[in-house]
Image (spheres, rainbow, N blue to C red):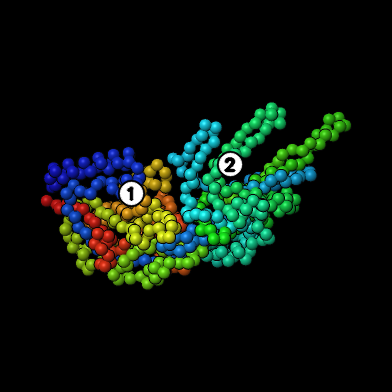
Amino acid sequence: MYNNSFFKKMLVLASIILLYSCDKDYNAIGSDLIGDNHFDFSTYTSNVIAYNQKIGAVQSNDLAVNGLGIYTNPAFGTTTANFATQLSLSSLSPEIGSNPQIESVVLTVPYFTDATKTVTNADGSHVYELDSIYGGSPAEIKLSVYESGYFMRDLDPATGFKEAQKYYTNQNVNFDNAKVGNRLNDDVNVAQNDGFFFSAAEYSEKTIDEKTKVETTTRTAPGMRLSLNKSFFDSKIIHAPSVKLATADVFKDYFRGLYFKVEKSGGNSGNLALLNFKLGKITIKYKEDLSTTVGTVVTVTRVDKSIILNMAGNSVSLLEQTNTNALFTNATTNANTIDGDENLFLKGGEGSMAILNLFSTPGELTTLRSKGWLINEANLVFHIDTEKMKDIGGVKVFEPNRIYLYDLTNSRPVVDYFNDGTTGKNPKNGKLIYGGMINKETSTNGRGLNYKIRITNQIRNLLKNADSTNVKFGLVVTEDINMVTSNYLKTPNSFTSQVPKASVMNPLGTILYGGKSSVPVDKRLKLEIFYTKPN
Protein backbone atom coordinates (compact mmCIF):
# COMPACT_ATOMS: atom_id res chain seq x y z
CA MET A 1 0.00 0.00 0.00
CA TYR A 2 1.27 3.49 -0.81
CA ASN A 3 1.46 6.16 1.87
CA ASN A 4 -0.83 9.19 2.14
CA SER A 5 1.88 11.68 1.19
CA PHE A 6 2.18 10.06 -2.22
CA PHE A 7 -1.55 10.40 -2.90
CA LYS A 8 -1.39 14.05 -1.84
CA LYS A 9 1.39 14.60 -4.34
CA MET A 10 -0.60 12.94 -7.10
CA LEU A 11 -3.65 15.07 -6.27
CA VAL A 12 -1.57 18.25 -6.55
CA LEU A 13 -0.05 16.99 -9.80
CA ALA A 14 -3.46 16.26 -11.33
CA SER A 15 -4.76 19.68 -10.31
CA ILE A 16 -1.82 21.47 -11.92
CA ILE A 17 -2.21 19.53 -15.16
CA LEU A 18 -5.91 20.45 -15.29
CA LEU A 19 -5.30 24.13 -14.61
CA TYR A 20 -2.51 24.40 -17.15
CA SER A 21 -4.37 22.53 -19.85
CA CYS A 22 -7.32 24.92 -19.50
CA ASP A 23 -5.55 28.20 -19.02
CA LYS A 24 -2.05 28.29 -20.45
CA ASP A 25 -0.68 29.04 -23.86
CA TYR A 26 0.44 25.94 -25.76
CA ASN A 27 4.13 26.85 -25.86
CA ALA A 28 4.26 27.19 -22.08
CA ILE A 29 2.42 23.92 -21.63
CA GLY A 30 4.60 22.06 -24.07
CA SER A 31 7.86 23.32 -22.60
CA ASP A 32 7.16 22.88 -18.89
CA LEU A 33 3.77 21.56 -17.89
CA ILE A 34 4.48 20.49 -14.32
CA GLY A 35 7.71 22.26 -13.44
CA ASP A 36 11.14 20.80 -12.78
CA ASN A 37 11.05 19.60 -9.18
CA HIS A 38 8.77 16.63 -9.98
CA PHE A 39 7.62 16.61 -6.33
CA ASP A 40 10.76 14.83 -5.16
CA PHE A 41 10.11 11.73 -7.26
CA SER A 42 13.13 9.52 -7.80
CA THR A 43 14.83 9.89 -11.17
CA TYR A 44 16.30 7.37 -13.57
CA THR A 45 18.04 8.30 -16.83
CA SER A 46 18.61 5.92 -19.70
CA ASN A 47 20.91 6.32 -22.69
CA VAL A 48 19.26 6.72 -26.08
CA ILE A 49 20.78 5.52 -29.34
CA ALA A 50 19.58 8.01 -31.97
CA TYR A 51 20.76 8.32 -35.56
CA ASN A 52 19.85 9.96 -38.85
CA GLN A 53 17.98 8.55 -41.83
CA LYS A 54 17.56 10.24 -45.21
CA ILE A 55 13.97 10.34 -46.47
CA GLY A 56 14.51 10.99 -50.19
CA ALA A 57 11.67 11.26 -52.70
CA VAL A 58 8.33 10.87 -50.94
CA GLN A 59 4.67 10.73 -51.92
CA SER A 60 3.33 14.29 -51.98
CA ASN A 61 -0.02 14.26 -53.72
CA ASP A 62 -3.14 15.90 -52.27
CA LEU A 63 -1.50 17.54 -49.24
CA ALA A 64 -3.53 19.90 -47.06
CA VAL A 65 -0.96 22.65 -47.66
CA ASN A 66 1.78 22.92 -50.27
CA GLY A 67 4.94 24.96 -50.44
CA LEU A 68 5.56 27.37 -53.30
CA GLY A 69 8.76 29.34 -53.69
CA ILE A 70 12.44 29.22 -52.79
CA TYR A 71 13.91 29.03 -49.29
CA THR A 72 17.62 28.89 -48.49
CA ASN A 73 18.47 27.52 -45.06
CA PRO A 74 22.20 27.75 -44.24
CA ALA A 75 21.93 24.60 -42.11
CA PHE A 76 20.43 22.45 -44.87
CA GLY A 77 20.56 24.07 -48.31
CA THR A 78 18.06 25.50 -50.81
CA THR A 79 14.55 24.13 -51.24
CA THR A 80 12.68 24.97 -54.45
CA ALA A 81 8.98 24.14 -54.26
CA ASN A 82 6.85 23.89 -57.41
CA PHE A 83 3.24 22.74 -57.57
CA ALA A 84 0.77 21.17 -60.00
CA THR A 85 -2.99 20.81 -59.71
CA GLN A 86 -6.01 19.74 -61.68
CA LEU A 87 -8.95 22.11 -62.17
CA SER A 88 -12.71 21.61 -62.08
CA LEU A 89 -15.64 23.63 -63.37
CA SER A 90 -17.81 25.01 -60.56
CA SER A 91 -20.78 24.27 -62.85
CA LEU A 92 -20.65 21.78 -65.69
CA SER A 93 -21.98 22.69 -69.14
CA PRO A 94 -21.99 26.46 -68.55
CA GLU A 95 -24.45 28.31 -70.78
CA ILE A 96 -22.46 30.78 -72.84
CA GLY A 97 -24.54 33.21 -74.90
CA SER A 98 -23.84 34.99 -78.14
CA ASN A 99 -20.96 37.32 -78.79
CA PRO A 100 -19.07 36.57 -75.56
CA GLN A 101 -16.03 38.71 -74.77
CA ILE A 102 -13.70 38.19 -71.80
CA GLU A 103 -13.17 41.15 -69.51
CA SER A 104 -10.69 39.53 -67.12
CA VAL A 105 -9.22 36.21 -65.97
CA VAL A 106 -7.93 36.27 -62.39
CA LEU A 107 -6.29 33.49 -60.38
CA THR A 108 -6.55 33.85 -56.60
CA VAL A 109 -5.11 31.80 -53.73
CA PRO A 110 -5.44 33.13 -50.15
CA TYR A 111 -2.41 33.45 -47.88
CA PHE A 112 -2.30 32.41 -44.25
CA THR A 113 -2.37 35.42 -41.92
CA ASP A 114 -1.81 35.81 -38.19
CA ALA A 115 -5.28 36.79 -36.91
CA THR A 116 -3.87 37.98 -33.59
CA LYS A 117 -1.85 40.67 -35.38
CA THR A 118 -4.50 41.95 -37.80
CA VAL A 119 -5.25 45.65 -37.29
CA THR A 120 -8.47 47.33 -38.44
CA ASN A 121 -8.15 50.98 -39.42
CA ALA A 122 -10.79 53.67 -38.94
CA ASP A 123 -11.76 53.54 -42.63
CA GLY A 124 -12.47 49.81 -42.45
CA SER A 125 -9.24 48.74 -44.12
CA HIS A 126 -6.95 46.18 -42.52
CA VAL A 127 -3.25 45.69 -41.95
CA TYR A 128 -2.23 42.04 -42.05
CA GLU A 129 0.82 40.02 -41.05
CA LEU A 130 1.44 36.96 -43.18
CA ASP A 131 1.99 33.57 -41.60
CA SER A 132 3.94 30.57 -42.98
CA ILE A 133 6.23 32.68 -45.19
CA TYR A 134 9.90 31.69 -45.00
CA GLY A 135 13.02 33.31 -46.42
CA GLY A 136 14.88 36.58 -46.41
CA SER A 137 14.99 39.84 -48.30
CA PRO A 138 14.91 40.74 -51.16
CA ALA A 139 12.12 38.20 -51.49
CA GLU A 140 11.25 38.26 -55.20
CA ILE A 141 11.06 35.07 -57.24
CA LYS A 142 10.26 34.34 -60.87
CA LEU A 143 6.83 32.71 -61.02
CA SER A 144 5.43 31.07 -64.14
CA VAL A 145 2.01 29.46 -64.38
CA TYR A 146 1.62 27.06 -67.31
CA GLU A 147 -1.12 24.89 -68.70
CA SER A 148 -0.15 21.38 -67.65
CA GLY A 149 -0.08 18.68 -70.26
CA TYR A 150 0.58 15.92 -67.72
CA PHE A 151 -2.52 13.86 -66.98
CA MET A 152 -2.85 12.98 -63.29
CA ARG A 153 -4.98 9.88 -63.21
CA ASP A 154 -6.95 8.87 -60.14
CA LEU A 155 -6.09 5.16 -60.02
CA ASP A 156 -2.83 3.27 -60.44
CA PRO A 157 -2.84 0.80 -63.36
CA ALA A 158 -0.02 -1.14 -61.69
CA THR A 159 -2.52 -2.21 -59.02
CA GLY A 160 -5.22 -3.11 -61.52
CA PHE A 161 -6.80 0.31 -60.90
CA LYS A 162 -7.64 -0.71 -57.32
CA GLU A 163 -5.42 1.82 -55.50
CA ALA A 164 -5.02 5.57 -55.78
CA GLN A 165 -2.18 6.78 -57.99
CA LYS A 166 0.80 8.10 -56.03
CA TYR A 167 2.79 11.16 -57.11
CA TYR A 168 6.17 12.09 -55.64
CA THR A 169 8.26 15.10 -54.75
CA ASN A 170 10.88 14.34 -57.43
CA GLN A 171 8.55 14.43 -60.45
CA ASN A 172 9.45 17.97 -61.54
CA VAL A 173 10.82 16.66 -64.82
CA ASN A 174 7.46 15.11 -65.74
CA PHE A 175 5.65 18.41 -65.41
CA ASP A 176 8.47 20.47 -66.92
CA ASN A 177 8.49 18.34 -70.04
CA ALA A 178 4.71 18.36 -70.31
CA LYS A 179 3.97 22.05 -69.82
CA VAL A 180 2.02 23.54 -72.72
CA GLY A 181 2.73 26.83 -74.47
CA ASN A 182 3.86 30.08 -72.87
CA ARG A 183 3.22 31.06 -69.30
CA LEU A 184 -0.30 32.28 -68.58
CA ASN A 185 0.60 34.97 -66.03
CA ASP A 186 2.05 37.23 -68.73
CA ASP A 187 0.84 40.58 -67.38
CA VAL A 188 3.12 43.60 -67.94
CA ASN A 189 3.27 44.04 -64.17
CA VAL A 190 6.43 42.12 -63.20
CA ALA A 191 5.13 41.69 -59.65
CA GLN A 192 2.89 39.00 -61.15
CA ASN A 193 5.71 37.02 -62.78
CA ASP A 194 9.43 37.91 -63.01
CA GLY A 195 9.41 39.88 -59.76
CA PHE A 196 6.69 38.06 -57.86
CA PHE A 197 6.57 38.27 -54.06
CA PHE A 198 4.09 37.30 -51.35
CA SER A 199 2.51 40.65 -50.55
CA ALA A 200 0.73 41.37 -47.27
CA ALA A 201 -1.31 44.14 -48.88
CA GLU A 202 -5.07 43.98 -48.63
CA TYR A 203 -6.94 43.95 -51.95
CA SER A 204 -9.79 46.43 -52.27
CA GLU A 205 -12.19 46.87 -55.18
CA LYS A 206 -14.75 49.64 -55.68
CA THR A 207 -17.96 49.06 -57.60
CA ILE A 208 -20.81 51.42 -58.44
CA ASP A 209 -24.39 50.19 -58.70
CA GLU A 210 -25.69 51.19 -62.15
CA LYS A 211 -29.17 51.96 -60.81
CA THR A 212 -28.53 53.52 -57.41
CA LYS A 213 -25.07 54.91 -58.20
CA VAL A 214 -23.99 53.85 -54.71
CA GLU A 215 -20.30 53.02 -54.42
CA THR A 216 -19.29 49.89 -52.53
CA THR A 217 -15.80 48.88 -51.45
CA THR A 218 -15.04 45.17 -51.20
CA ARG A 219 -11.97 44.25 -49.17
CA THR A 220 -10.16 40.92 -49.46
CA ALA A 221 -7.42 39.53 -47.23
CA PRO A 222 -3.96 39.12 -48.82
CA GLY A 223 -3.49 36.41 -51.37
CA MET A 224 -1.91 35.51 -54.69
CA ARG A 225 -3.75 37.46 -57.38
CA LEU A 226 -2.59 36.90 -60.96
CA SER A 227 -4.09 38.20 -64.20
CA LEU A 228 -4.00 35.35 -66.71
CA ASN A 229 -3.93 35.44 -70.50
CA LYS A 230 -7.43 36.22 -71.79
CA SER A 231 -6.87 34.82 -75.30
CA PHE A 232 -5.96 31.42 -73.89
CA PHE A 233 -9.10 31.17 -71.77
CA ASP A 234 -11.26 32.53 -74.56
CA SER A 235 -10.18 29.60 -76.69
CA LYS A 236 -9.91 26.98 -73.93
CA ILE A 237 -13.16 27.73 -72.10
CA ILE A 238 -15.43 30.33 -73.72
CA HIS A 239 -15.22 28.87 -77.23
CA ALA A 240 -14.52 25.26 -76.22
CA PRO A 241 -16.59 22.49 -77.82
CA SER A 242 -19.55 22.04 -75.47
CA VAL A 243 -18.80 18.34 -75.03
CA LYS A 244 -15.46 19.21 -73.39
CA LEU A 245 -17.25 21.07 -70.59
CA ALA A 246 -20.07 18.58 -70.09
CA THR A 247 -18.56 16.07 -67.62
CA ALA A 248 -15.86 16.22 -64.95
CA ASP A 249 -13.82 13.34 -66.39
CA VAL A 250 -13.82 14.72 -69.92
CA PHE A 251 -12.90 18.19 -68.67
CA LYS A 252 -9.95 16.88 -66.59
CA ASP A 253 -8.50 15.24 -69.69
CA TYR A 254 -9.26 18.26 -71.90
CA PHE A 255 -7.76 20.85 -69.50
CA ARG A 256 -5.24 18.89 -67.45
CA GLY A 257 -4.56 21.62 -64.93
CA LEU A 258 -1.92 24.16 -63.99
CA TYR A 259 1.78 23.89 -63.28
CA PHE A 260 3.31 26.53 -60.97
CA LYS A 261 7.05 26.82 -61.57
CA VAL A 262 9.42 29.04 -59.55
CA GLU A 263 12.96 30.16 -60.32
CA LYS A 264 15.51 32.58 -58.90
CA SER A 265 14.85 36.20 -59.81
CA GLY A 266 18.22 37.83 -60.35
CA GLY A 267 20.24 37.86 -57.14
CA ASN A 268 17.18 37.81 -54.88
CA SER A 269 17.07 35.27 -52.07
CA GLY A 270 13.39 34.50 -52.57
CA ASN A 271 10.65 33.33 -50.22
CA LEU A 272 8.69 30.13 -49.78
CA ALA A 273 5.06 30.16 -48.64
CA LEU A 274 2.74 27.42 -47.47
CA LEU A 275 -0.58 27.71 -49.30
CA ASN A 276 -3.92 25.94 -49.29
CA PHE A 277 -4.38 25.70 -53.04
CA LYS A 278 -7.69 23.91 -52.53
CA LEU A 279 -9.13 27.34 -51.73
CA GLY A 280 -7.74 28.75 -54.98
CA LYS A 281 -9.80 29.48 -58.07
CA ILE A 282 -9.77 31.10 -61.50
CA THR A 283 -12.55 33.59 -62.17
CA ILE A 284 -13.37 34.34 -65.83
CA LYS A 285 -15.49 37.46 -66.19
CA TYR A 286 -17.04 38.16 -69.57
CA LYS A 287 -19.89 39.97 -71.29
CA GLU A 288 -22.41 38.48 -73.69
CA ASP A 289 -25.51 39.61 -75.60
CA LEU A 290 -28.93 39.31 -74.03
CA SER A 291 -31.84 39.65 -76.46
CA THR A 292 -35.33 40.60 -75.30
CA THR A 293 -38.37 40.88 -77.54
CA VAL A 294 -41.33 43.14 -76.87
CA GLY A 295 -43.89 42.79 -79.63
CA THR A 296 -41.82 43.02 -82.78
CA VAL A 297 -39.02 45.00 -81.17
CA VAL A 298 -35.85 43.11 -80.33
CA THR A 299 -33.49 44.77 -77.84
CA VAL A 300 -29.92 43.57 -77.37
CA THR A 301 -28.05 44.46 -74.17
CA ARG A 302 -24.66 43.43 -72.86
CA VAL A 303 -24.74 41.52 -69.56
CA ASP A 304 -22.03 40.42 -67.14
CA LYS A 305 -21.36 36.71 -66.75
CA SER A 306 -18.67 34.62 -65.04
CA ILE A 307 -17.25 31.10 -64.98
CA ILE A 308 -15.24 29.77 -62.06
CA LEU A 309 -12.61 27.06 -62.20
CA ASN A 310 -11.74 25.57 -58.81
CA MET A 311 -8.34 24.13 -57.95
CA ALA A 312 -9.88 20.77 -57.16
CA GLY A 313 -8.76 17.29 -58.05
CA ASN A 314 -5.35 15.67 -57.93
CA SER A 315 -2.39 17.82 -56.94
CA VAL A 316 1.28 17.30 -56.16
CA SER A 317 4.02 19.16 -54.30
CA LEU A 318 7.25 19.11 -56.34
CA LEU A 319 10.49 19.71 -54.43
CA GLU A 320 14.13 20.20 -55.40
CA GLN A 321 16.99 20.31 -52.89
CA THR A 322 20.19 22.06 -54.03
CA ASN A 323 23.33 23.57 -52.47
CA THR A 324 22.97 20.97 -49.75
CA ASN A 325 25.04 21.63 -46.62
CA ALA A 326 27.90 19.12 -46.35
CA LEU A 327 27.15 18.42 -42.67
CA PHE A 328 23.57 17.52 -43.56
CA THR A 329 24.66 15.26 -46.41
CA ASN A 330 27.27 13.47 -44.33
CA ALA A 331 24.96 12.98 -41.36
CA THR A 332 22.19 11.42 -43.42
CA THR A 333 24.41 9.12 -45.48
CA ASN A 334 26.85 7.97 -42.78
CA ALA A 335 24.63 7.35 -39.76
CA ASN A 336 26.15 5.58 -36.75
CA THR A 337 23.47 3.02 -35.91
CA ILE A 338 25.58 1.45 -33.16
CA ASP A 339 26.63 4.38 -30.96
CA GLY A 340 24.24 6.97 -32.35
CA ASP A 341 24.99 10.32 -34.01
CA GLU A 342 26.17 13.50 -32.31
CA ASN A 343 23.58 15.55 -34.20
CA LEU A 344 20.12 14.66 -35.41
CA PHE A 345 19.05 16.43 -38.62
CA LEU A 346 15.28 16.71 -38.99
CA LYS A 347 14.13 18.17 -42.31
CA GLY A 348 10.63 18.18 -43.74
CA GLY A 349 9.65 17.40 -47.31
CA GLU A 350 12.29 15.44 -49.19
CA GLY A 351 14.53 15.62 -46.13
CA SER A 352 15.53 13.49 -43.16
CA MET A 353 14.36 12.00 -39.89
CA ALA A 354 15.86 10.46 -36.76
CA ILE A 355 15.47 6.92 -35.44
CA LEU A 356 15.57 6.24 -31.70
CA ASN A 357 16.36 3.03 -29.83
CA LEU A 358 15.50 3.04 -26.11
CA PHE A 359 16.87 0.65 -23.44
CA SER A 360 19.67 -0.51 -25.71
CA THR A 361 21.97 -1.56 -22.84
CA PRO A 362 21.88 -5.38 -22.49
CA GLY A 363 19.63 -6.46 -19.61
CA GLU A 364 18.47 -2.91 -18.82
CA LEU A 365 14.83 -3.44 -19.68
CA THR A 366 14.62 -6.74 -17.76
CA THR A 367 16.16 -5.11 -14.69
CA LEU A 368 13.75 -2.17 -14.75
CA ARG A 369 10.74 -4.45 -15.13
CA SER A 370 11.78 -6.35 -12.00
CA LYS A 371 11.76 -3.23 -9.82
CA GLY A 372 8.00 -2.68 -9.89
CA TRP A 373 8.29 1.12 -9.98
CA LEU A 374 5.25 3.35 -10.31
CA ILE A 375 6.12 5.50 -13.34
CA ASN A 376 4.98 9.08 -12.73
CA GLU A 377 6.46 10.69 -15.82
CA ALA A 378 8.83 9.87 -18.66
CA ASN A 379 10.30 12.47 -21.02
CA LEU A 380 12.60 12.86 -23.97
CA VAL A 381 14.15 16.33 -24.12
CA PHE A 382 15.76 17.21 -27.44
CA HIS A 383 18.24 20.09 -27.16
CA ILE A 384 18.74 22.25 -30.24
CA ASP A 385 22.30 22.76 -31.45
CA THR A 386 22.01 26.53 -31.38
CA GLU A 387 25.43 27.06 -32.91
CA LYS A 388 24.57 25.09 -36.05
CA MET A 389 21.08 26.61 -36.20
CA LYS A 390 22.15 30.25 -35.90
CA ASP A 391 21.58 32.84 -38.63
CA ILE A 392 24.53 32.95 -41.00
CA GLY A 393 25.56 35.98 -43.06
CA GLY A 394 22.32 37.75 -42.29
CA VAL A 395 20.25 34.81 -43.60
CA LYS A 396 17.52 33.97 -41.11
CA VAL A 397 17.12 30.34 -40.11
CA PHE A 398 13.46 29.50 -39.46
CA GLU A 399 12.83 26.78 -36.89
CA PRO A 400 9.93 24.29 -36.96
CA ASN A 401 7.40 24.97 -34.23
CA ARG A 402 6.90 21.31 -33.53
CA ILE A 403 8.40 17.84 -33.84
CA TYR A 404 6.59 14.51 -33.72
CA LEU A 405 7.73 11.25 -32.11
CA TYR A 406 5.94 8.06 -33.18
CA ASP A 407 6.12 4.29 -33.11
CA LEU A 408 8.26 3.60 -36.18
CA THR A 409 7.99 -0.18 -35.92
CA ASN A 410 4.21 -0.09 -36.36
CA SER A 411 3.87 3.29 -38.14
CA ARG A 412 1.46 4.68 -35.56
CA PRO A 413 1.40 7.26 -32.73
CA VAL A 414 2.66 6.39 -29.26
CA VAL A 415 0.18 5.65 -26.45
CA ASP A 416 0.59 9.12 -24.93
CA TYR A 417 -0.52 10.73 -28.18
CA PHE A 418 -3.73 8.69 -28.20
CA ASN A 419 -4.42 9.44 -24.52
CA ASP A 420 -3.99 13.21 -24.89
CA GLY A 421 -7.28 14.99 -25.61
CA THR A 422 -6.06 18.55 -25.02
CA THR A 423 -6.54 21.24 -27.66
CA GLY A 424 -4.86 24.57 -28.35
CA LYS A 425 -6.06 27.94 -29.58
CA ASN A 426 -5.17 26.75 -33.07
CA PRO A 427 -6.43 23.27 -34.03
CA LYS A 428 -2.91 22.40 -35.22
CA ASN A 429 -1.58 22.95 -31.70
CA GLY A 430 -3.40 20.19 -29.82
CA LYS A 431 -1.84 17.34 -27.83
CA LEU A 432 -0.43 19.80 -25.32
CA ILE A 433 0.61 17.27 -22.68
CA TYR A 434 2.24 14.95 -25.20
CA GLY A 435 4.19 18.01 -26.33
CA GLY A 436 6.84 18.43 -28.98
CA MET A 437 6.50 22.23 -29.16
CA ILE A 438 9.58 24.40 -29.41
CA ASN A 439 10.74 26.03 -26.18
CA LYS A 440 12.35 29.39 -26.95
CA GLU A 441 14.61 31.62 -24.93
CA THR A 442 13.05 34.83 -23.65
CA SER A 443 15.75 37.17 -24.98
CA THR A 444 15.12 39.41 -27.97
CA ASN A 445 16.29 36.94 -30.62
CA GLY A 446 13.89 34.27 -29.36
CA ARG A 447 15.88 31.32 -30.66
CA GLY A 448 14.79 27.76 -29.90
CA LEU A 449 16.33 25.89 -26.97
CA ASN A 450 14.69 22.48 -26.94
CA TYR A 451 11.66 20.29 -27.60
CA LYS A 452 10.12 18.08 -24.91
CA ILE A 453 7.97 15.01 -25.57
CA ARG A 454 6.23 12.97 -22.88
CA ILE A 455 6.00 9.22 -23.33
CA THR A 456 4.89 8.36 -19.79
CA ASN A 457 2.23 5.83 -20.74
CA GLN A 458 4.38 4.29 -23.45
CA ILE A 459 7.16 3.59 -20.91
CA ARG A 460 4.71 2.61 -18.19
CA ASN A 461 3.17 -0.06 -20.43
CA LEU A 462 6.58 -1.29 -21.59
CA LEU A 463 7.87 -1.79 -18.03
CA LYS A 464 4.64 -3.20 -16.65
CA ASN A 465 3.97 -5.77 -19.36
CA ALA A 466 6.75 -8.27 -19.98
CA ASP A 467 5.32 -9.15 -23.38
CA SER A 468 5.32 -5.52 -24.62
CA THR A 469 7.67 -4.88 -27.53
CA ASN A 470 10.47 -2.33 -27.21
CA VAL A 471 9.81 -0.64 -30.54
CA LYS A 472 11.95 1.79 -32.53
CA PHE A 473 10.76 5.39 -32.63
CA GLY A 474 10.73 7.84 -35.51
CA LEU A 475 11.23 11.57 -35.04
CA VAL A 476 10.25 14.16 -37.67
CA VAL A 477 9.20 17.78 -38.00
CA THR A 478 5.44 18.22 -38.37
CA GLU A 479 3.13 20.83 -39.86
CA ASP A 480 -0.01 19.55 -38.11
CA ILE A 481 0.08 17.44 -34.93
CA ASN A 482 -3.46 16.19 -35.57
CA MET A 483 -2.44 14.49 -38.82
CA VAL A 484 -0.92 11.06 -38.23
CA THR A 485 -1.45 9.31 -41.57
CA SER A 486 1.66 8.39 -43.54
CA ASN A 487 2.91 8.83 -47.10
CA TYR A 488 5.06 6.31 -48.94
CA LEU A 489 8.71 6.72 -49.78
CA LYS A 490 9.47 6.24 -53.46
CA THR A 491 12.37 4.00 -52.44
CA PRO A 492 11.96 2.34 -49.00
CA ASN A 493 15.02 2.27 -46.76
CA SER A 494 16.10 -0.47 -44.37
CA PHE A 495 13.96 0.95 -41.54
CA THR A 496 10.70 2.10 -43.10
CA SER A 497 8.68 2.50 -46.28
CA GLN A 498 6.71 5.55 -45.16
CA VAL A 499 6.87 8.78 -43.16
CA PRO A 500 4.20 10.97 -41.50
CA LYS A 501 2.30 13.03 -44.08
CA ALA A 502 2.49 16.19 -41.94
CA SER A 503 6.30 16.02 -42.18
CA VAL A 504 6.12 16.10 -45.97
CA MET A 505 4.10 19.33 -45.70
CA ASN A 506 6.69 21.18 -43.57
CA PRO A 507 9.62 22.80 -45.44
CA LEU A 508 11.68 23.58 -42.32
CA GLY A 509 14.41 21.75 -40.46
CA THR A 510 16.22 21.68 -37.14
CA ILE A 511 19.47 20.22 -35.80
CA LEU A 512 19.31 18.51 -32.42
CA TYR A 513 21.90 16.95 -30.15
CA GLY A 514 21.87 13.15 -30.16
CA GLY A 515 22.59 10.67 -27.40
CA LYS A 516 26.17 9.81 -28.33
CA SER A 517 28.64 9.84 -25.42
CA SER A 518 30.72 12.58 -27.09
CA VAL A 519 27.83 15.07 -26.73
CA PRO A 520 28.14 17.37 -23.66
CA VAL A 521 26.17 15.87 -20.77
CA ASP A 522 23.87 18.86 -20.36
CA LYS A 523 22.85 18.66 -24.04
CA ARG A 524 22.88 14.90 -24.49
CA LEU A 525 19.62 13.17 -25.38
CA LYS A 526 18.46 10.89 -22.56
CA LEU A 527 15.24 9.26 -21.46
CA GLU A 528 14.22 10.71 -18.09
CA ILE A 529 11.97 8.57 -15.90
CA PHE A 530 10.46 9.92 -12.68
CA TYR A 531 9.17 7.13 -10.47
CA THR A 532 8.05 6.14 -7.00
CA LYS A 533 9.26 2.95 -5.34
CA PRO A 534 6.58 0.64 -3.97
CA ASN A 535 6.45 0.33 -0.19
Q: CA distance from mark 1 to mark 2?
A: 36 Å
Q: Can residue 459 be seen from the camera position used here?
A: yes
At label 2, counting other C-alpha atoms closer than 10 Å, the crowd grade (few under 14, some 14-19, many 20 or more) is some
Residue in the picture at 32% in, 48% down:
442
Q: Nearer the viewer, residue 188 or 16?
A: 188
Query: Is 315 on the left or on the right of 2, as rendered?
Result: right
Q: Residue 49 versus residue 414: which sits nearer the camera? A: 49
Are discs 1 and 2 less than 8 Å apart at CB? Answer: no
User: What amino acid is found at the position of numbered circle 1 in the picture?
Assistant: Ser
Give residue 384's position: percent from left, percent from top: 33, 58
The residue most toward the right is 296
Q: Residue at x 45, y 67 (%)?
A: 324
Label 1's element?
A: loop
Q: Earlier in the sequence, mark 1 or mark 2?
A: 2
Q: Which element carries disc 2, helix, strand or loop?
A: strand
The reply to whether residue 473 is visible in this rendering is no
**In the rendered view, would you say 428 is above or below 264?**
above
Which residue position holds label 1? 443
Q: Which residue is mark 2?
A: 203
